Image (cartoon, rainbow, N blue to C red):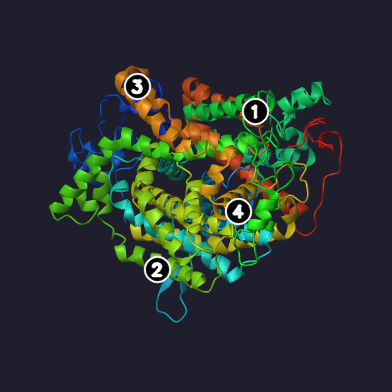
């Protein structure tokens, strides 16, 4: 059934007059919903800016819902414009979600488990492996969503309908209970989202082994990985009461996936020529990207960074630095590697991220690499000019800092060694990246308080009033049609979340008691408290804007202040342990809330959604650890910096940054570090981050038509803080691709865009990830096979920037 009304075409969709292709009309309308959802992600636009989110906020005639579109059950309610079941649901949500439900559809089936294992196994491995690479394309959830649709339908056709009796029980289940249901489809995707991802604990596990020679016991590592995930999942209970059930919170990413689910349901139930063409496009693009990526990733690495200035002057040091994408500014540099092009600064896919967001990220890259770097290299910006673009630690003379020499046998700061070697120095780019990282944290909080205070106050007042009226069930607190439909299912009781928290809390307490981790026991409680404080406000920010604030370095600063107030516990790995616990308390809570919102939109029983999320993480964590072990056993030389990777992919940038932060905040301590002249500007970043939103808020109130509220300084600061790590290629190609896909195609070829955009997004990411897996299996699993050197894989420099100064 269509989730959109007959006769409503919207401002961006042309009316399809042909009567001989009704199925095509349905698909176009459904895809239209998907587009407006995607373009609205992360936006809070209003006023006269001609973007879809601003179209959301304009006054629109609410469409009438016909019985043929919303189902016989809802038709009996005669849901009109002013019907209480509709009036609280935002207009753009009504265009996407279905307003009827069939509670008899199967959910947890044999097919569900088969598909879950099928997608989690490679996804958990690839997603974890990607974290060690400098650039990557993540394991796309859209690939899972599209692939599960076709494979599930195939299983429903060919799997025998055998009744299998469970051992030692009178219960049985059917291998094939009928057509593949949309609820099975949603649950498989949610399970994969929970399990086919990386685990934040990879950082302390890797740091401990690579830099300090301490291998964390595999059992301890796996239980710790489970614990940090389940802590975050249990914290979702703090925010779900109003962020999930309140229809005013759209969760744009969840709405994007819901639009695709609804489109796939129509295609599965009534196939059309368009659905067949979409299938062909998906597989042709997937196969094309799969074979294409062998070129930049293995055969022809030069395609990863096309440095035109280096071709013109291959032995000119200045031209090489300006043009190189692997160690330079990346000016006039293009990339044909999807891992470099598809994800601008890891802020989201070019197919899904609104163009205005991509423009903000690209502007941050321009300021970072094309303004500040030359200002530092040739203009004297900064106090120390060695290793401009490195994220490692150095002595004042530019040689590598012997970090391990600062640690005594009882894991404290070796004051004698520190006096001998002197203060720690870092490159200018890392220094200003840290500055903007601090600024982004206070900027996000102040932005939320200034621009979001009315909404927050309204939520609190609404919750208080409803509790005074004695209404306890979240679905009973709201009268919109989505919550009315969800009353058919039992809610997840609070004690389930408490039990899940205890399953994470008890193992960590035991690990700390026996000394397997590197932090004092009391700081663990502080990490948990930090999560409690940020889950609701940052969840509110993400639910409205689709922007996820990274909080890692802020957590590590806090840990450094705490641990330097006591004796002992000066192992730098402790900062990563603390950051993993406090960080996942927010990150995993956000992921759980987002997937529960998908379940809410698609009318999935909440207890079933809860089970699928726990099951996915339970399966995915051991696979994550297996990937970590393989990489540490085979790539440790590259990650530690002892060996040079010509492709600049296995450089351990993230780990080096974590070691830098741990050494600064734990061994040296924030107080001593900030007293050094090089770091004097850093504390001012918190003030800059707080004042900038305040200035923009005043300007917005004074000049409302100037749209100052669109100048999202938090996104800009966050992009500025994303350390480029000698990789400056891909951003020009990425913004060109983003302009074509999210601006030109959207505005001028909307119907084609809406029909194929999600398909292309999934196909590109899926082809890339399959290529990564194939390269691993063929050239790195049993025996490492290297590509022979040739013109496109020069042994000295793959970009042919032969005079590039070392960083």
Q: Position of residue 417 (x, y in %)?
A: 68, 56
Q: Disc 2 vs disc 3: which is toward the camera?
A: 3
Work out whether residue 629 or residue 61 is closer to the camera in this orientation and state it. Answer: 629
Q: Earlier in the sequence, mark 2 or mark 3?
A: 2
Q: In this view, does 673 lie to the left or right of 179?
A: right
Q: Which mark is residue 376?
A: 1
Is disc 2 in contact with disc 4, using a CB cutoff of under 8 Å? Answer: no
Other residues around mark 4 within 10 Å, as few (<14) / some (14–19) / many (≥20): many
Q: Position of residue 83 (x, y in %)?
A: 18, 37
Q: Residue 502 carries which label?
A: 2
Work out whether residue 777 or residue 183 is closer to the camera in this orientation and state it. Answer: 777
Q: Position of residue 72 (x, y in %)?
A: 25, 45
Is disc 4 in contact with disc 1, using a CB cutoff of under 8 Å? Answer: no
| Residue at the spot of label 3 | 699
Helix, strand or loop for disc 1: helix
Work out whether residue 164 or residue 351 is closer to the camera in this orientation and state it. Answer: 351
Q: Is residue 180 left or right of residue 244?
A: right
Location of residue 415 by image quarter = bottom right
User: Disc 4 and disc 3: Cα gap in Å?
Assistant: 44 Å
Helix, strand or loop for disc 3: helix
User: Disc 2 and disc 4: Cα gap in Å?
Assistant: 26 Å
| Residue at the spot of label 4 | 128
Q: Which of marks 2 and 1 is nearer the N terminus?
A: 1
Q: Is residue 36 left or right of residue 726?
A: left
User: Disc 2 and disc 1: Cα gap in Å?
Assistant: 51 Å
């Amino acid at each position: 059934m269509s989730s959109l009304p007959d006769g409503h075409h919207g401002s961006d969709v042309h009316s399809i007059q042909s009567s001989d292709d009704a199925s095509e009309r349905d698909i176009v309308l459904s895809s239209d919903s998907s587009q407006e959802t995607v373009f609205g992600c992360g936006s809070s636009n209003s006023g006269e800016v001609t973007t879809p989110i601003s179209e959301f906020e304009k006054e629109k005639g609410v469409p009438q819902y016909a019985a043929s579109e919303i189902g016989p059950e809802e038709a009996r309610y005669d849901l009109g414009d002013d019907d209480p079941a509709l009036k609280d649901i935002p207009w753009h949500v009504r265009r996407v979600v279905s307003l009827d439900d069939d509670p008899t559809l199967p959910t947890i089936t044999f097919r569900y488990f088969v598909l879950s294992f099928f997608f989690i196994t490679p996804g958990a491995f690839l997603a974890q492996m990607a974290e060690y690479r400098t650039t990557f394309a993540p394991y796309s959830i859209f690939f899972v969503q599209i692939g599960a649709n076709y494979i599930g339908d195939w299983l429903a056709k060919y799997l025998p309908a055998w009744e299998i009796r469970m051992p030692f029980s009178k219960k049985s289940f059917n291998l094939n209970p009928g057509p593949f249901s949309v609820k099975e489809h949603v649950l498989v995707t949610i399970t994969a989202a929970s399990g086919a991802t990386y685990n934040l604990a990879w950082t302390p596990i890797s740091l401990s082994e690579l830099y300090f020679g301490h291998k964390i016991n595999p059992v301890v590592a796996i239980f710790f990985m489970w614990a940090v995930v389940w802590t975050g999942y249990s914290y979702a209970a703090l925010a779900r009461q109003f962020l999930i059930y309140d229809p005013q919170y759209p969760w744009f990413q969840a709405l994007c996936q819901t639009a695709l689910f609804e489109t796939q349901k129509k295609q599965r139930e009534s196939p059309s020529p368009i659905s067949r063409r979409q299938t062909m496009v998906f597989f042709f693009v997937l196969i094309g990207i799969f074979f294409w990526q062998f070129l930049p990733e293995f055969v022809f690495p030069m395609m990863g960074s096309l440095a035109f200035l280096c071709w013109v002057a291959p032995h000119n040091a200045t031209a090489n630095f300006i043009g190189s994408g692997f160690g330079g500014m990346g000016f006039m540099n293009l990339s044909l590697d999807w891992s470099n092009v598809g994800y601008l600064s890891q802020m989201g896919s070019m197919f899904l991220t609104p163009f205005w967001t991509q423009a903000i990220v690209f502007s941050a890259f321009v300021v970072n690499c094309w303004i500040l770097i030359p200002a530092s290299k040739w203009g004297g910006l900064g106090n120390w000019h060695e290793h401009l673009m490195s994220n490692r630690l150095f002595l004042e003379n530019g040689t590598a800092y012997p970090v391990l020499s600062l640690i005594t046998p009882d894991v404290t700061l070796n004051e004698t060694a520190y006096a001998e070697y002197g203060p720690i120095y870092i490159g200018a780019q890392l220094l200003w990246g840290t500055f903007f990282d601090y600024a982004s944290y206070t900027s996000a909080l102040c932005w939320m308080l200034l621009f979001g205070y009315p909404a927050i106050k309204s939520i609190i007042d609404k919750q208080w009033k409803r509790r005074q009226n004695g209404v306890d069930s979240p679905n009973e607190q709201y009268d919109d049609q989505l919550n009315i439909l969800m009353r058919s299912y039992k809610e997840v009781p609070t004690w389930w979340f408490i039990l899940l928290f205890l399953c994470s809390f008890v193992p960590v307490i035991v690990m700390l008691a026996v000394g397997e981790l590197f932090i004092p026991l009391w700081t663990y409680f502080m990490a948990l408290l930090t999560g409690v404080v940020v889950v609701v406000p940052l969840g509110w920010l993400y639910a409205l804007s689709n922007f996820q604030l990274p909080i890692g370095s802020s957590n590590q600063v806090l840990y450094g202040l705490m641990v330097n107030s006591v004796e002992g516990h000066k192992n730098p790995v402790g900062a990563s342990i603390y950051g993993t616990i406090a960080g996942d308390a927010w990150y995993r809570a956000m992921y759980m809330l987002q997937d529960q919102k998908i379940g809410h939109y698609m009318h999935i029983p909440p207890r079933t959604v809860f089970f699928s999320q726990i099951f996915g993480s339970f399966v995915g964590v051991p696979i994550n650890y297996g990937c970590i072990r393989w990489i540490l056993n085979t790539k440790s030389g590259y990650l530690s910096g002892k060996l040079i990777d010509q492709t600049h992919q296995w450089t351990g940038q993230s780990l080096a940054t974590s070691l830098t932060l741990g050494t600064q905040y734990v061994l040296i301590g924030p107080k001593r570090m900030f007293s050094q002249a090089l770091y004097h500007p850093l504390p001012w970043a918190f003030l800059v981050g707080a004042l900038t939103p305040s200035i923009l808020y005043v300007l917005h109130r004074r000049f409302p038509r100037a749209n100052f509220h669109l100048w999202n300084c938090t996104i800009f600061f966050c992009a500025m803080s994303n350390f480029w790590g000698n990789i400056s290629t891909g951003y020009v190609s990425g913004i060109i691709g983003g302009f074509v896909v999210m601006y030109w195609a959207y505005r001028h070829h909307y119907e084609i865009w809406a029909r194929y955009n999600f398909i292309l997004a999934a196909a590109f990411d899926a082809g890339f990830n399959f290529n990564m897996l194939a390269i691993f299996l063929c050239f790195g699993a049993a025996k490492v096979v290297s590509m022979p050197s040739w013109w496109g894989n020069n042994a000295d420099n793959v970009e042919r920037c032969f005079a590039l100064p070392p960083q």
